[in-house]
Image: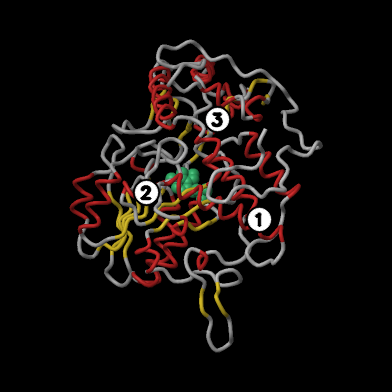
Amino acid sequence: MPTMPATGAAAAPAEVPTTPPAEVPTTPTTAVPATPPAEVPGLPTTAQPGVFSPESARKDVPILHRTVNGQPLVWLDNGATTQKPRQVIEAVSAYYSAANSNIHRGAHTMAREATELYEAGRNAVAQFLGAPSPDTVMFVRGTTEAINLVAQSWGRGHLGPGDDILVPVLEHHSDIVPWQLIAEETRARVVPVPLTPDGDIDQDAYADLLSARTQMVVVSQASNVLGTVPPVREMTALAHRYGAKVLVDGAQAVAHMPVDVQELGADFYAFSGHKLFAPTGIGALYATPEAMAEMRPWQGGGNMIESVSFERTTFAPMPHMMEAGTGHISGVVGLLAAIDWLRGFDQQAVAAYEQALMSYAMQAMATVPGLEVIGSAAERIAVMTFTLAGHDPASVANWLDKDGIAVRAGHHCAQPALAHYGLESAARASFALYNTSGEVDQLVASLRRLQEAGPGAEKA
Ligand SMILES: Cc1ncc(COP(=O)(O)O)c(C=O)c1O
């Protein structure tokens, strides 16, 4: 059982053990059988050639076999974070058990090994994103840090009074607030792009808002609140006609669809490892060489310099210039393992499975009295934000939690998008490749019981 990932230019260092240390548990302590998925036409539960089966992913993810409140866990909070396959857990553990070292600066074997792993991770991310070279990939803490990095390192030198940054109303706060901060400093403007009633980005309004003043367009490849998948390639091409740069937020997309940053035409692409079955605290930012050439250091310190003197400091080449201080090396190891794990499945088949699961969930949710799914964009990922008449969203989440079902309730860091629907809060079920139609049935059954029990039942 390999515990160190093998994807990337540099192979795992030869002396890293390939089995986890004995004291690291590799099986869950509360072994509860996975919920048997219901038989649903179009939704396979057992292996079929060319068809993705969720069981092939579930068997790798220990936490999915625990119980919550005496019930088998149904994890439907994948939009917040995804659960980790044992391949990721074991890779991180093996790294700390046998390979831990700082990188780049040491002149010893283990420093070289750690450096090789770190750069193998960069190479794996580049391949995963369809980037032309590992040198176009910077490691960051996650999507939020990546966007702040672009706002600070690119925005400060390129934005000025009267410049526009276009941000759809749909976007996560991470796509809005970093730009508000830099706009305040540079006297640029953050301009909202309106939504249609369905929850699509209004493409006519977008075209009208673009102008010679537009310096930056920020858009998510998939929305965390409505699941909307906007026509990013077309939006990017249009923005480029005005000379604007485009930052694509891939936080919600990377786990659900094949990504090709070159095909999208993105100048910048950001994602978080923890939404891609990898550890928290690690993510990546892609930038084209042209965009990189326009970036200035945003944090100073070790690793990002070439030489330092009190008279003059020179900087390391990109991408290292953007990586001040010691990076999250074990996080990169985990990310490398996660990418390896995910690439072990047919990506098109996974995407097709998730689409079928979402269609099934949409139909099933429609049978719950008083339940309303927010947004009905033409293209979407398997994210369903909903309200239930007579029950506030936090109460719905509490009720479901008693049945072992984890959904999120709140504003989903997308207050303008919810406000578009006159809401401050909603519940959200978000799916991943390891979710099953049986889990959808459990969600729907629990919601129906709540509705039958009436208002206030969740507090009983
Ligand atoms: C679309 C989108 N962008 C950005 C983020 C922020 O990601 P992180 O908190 O990992 O930086 C999220 C998190 O939910 C998201 O869904």
Q: Is residue 273 above or below residue 151?
A: above
Sequence order check, earlier mark of 3 and 1: 1
Q: Secondary structure at mark 2?
A: helix
Q: Secondary structure at mark 1?
A: helix
Q: Which mark is residue 397?
A: 3
Callouts 1 and 2 close, C-beta under 8 Å: no
Callouts 3 and 2 close, C-beta under 8 Å: no
Q: How many marks?
A: 3
Q: Badge 2, how many Cα within 10 Å: few under 14, some, many 20+? A: many
Q: Badge 1, how many Cα within 10 Å: few under 14, some, many 20+? A: many
Q: Report the amino acid beneath label 3.
A: Ala
What quarter of the picture does the N terminus occupy? top right
Q: Report the amino acid beneath label 2.
A: Val
Q: Nearer the viewer, mark 1 or mark 2?
A: 1
Locate residue 81, reporting x and y percent: 55, 39
**Residue at position x 71%, y 57% from top?**
110
Left or right of residue 75: residue 352: left
Residue indicated by mark 2: 261
Locate residue 201, reporting x and y percent: 28, 43
**Residue at position x 51%, y 14% from top?**
452
Locate residue 230, reporting x and y percent: 31, 41
Q: Which mark is residue 405?
A: none
Callouts 3 and 1 close, C-beta under 8 Å: no
What quarter of the picture does the C terminus occupy? top right
Q: Is residue 189 above or below residue 250?
A: below
Left or right of residue 107: residue 175: left
Q: Is residue 354 above or below residue 414?
A: above
**Marks 1/2: CA distance?**
28 Å
Residue indicated by mark 1: 114
**Marks 3/1: CA distance?**
42 Å
Q: Is residue 413 visible?
A: no
Q: Is residue 244 visible?
A: yes
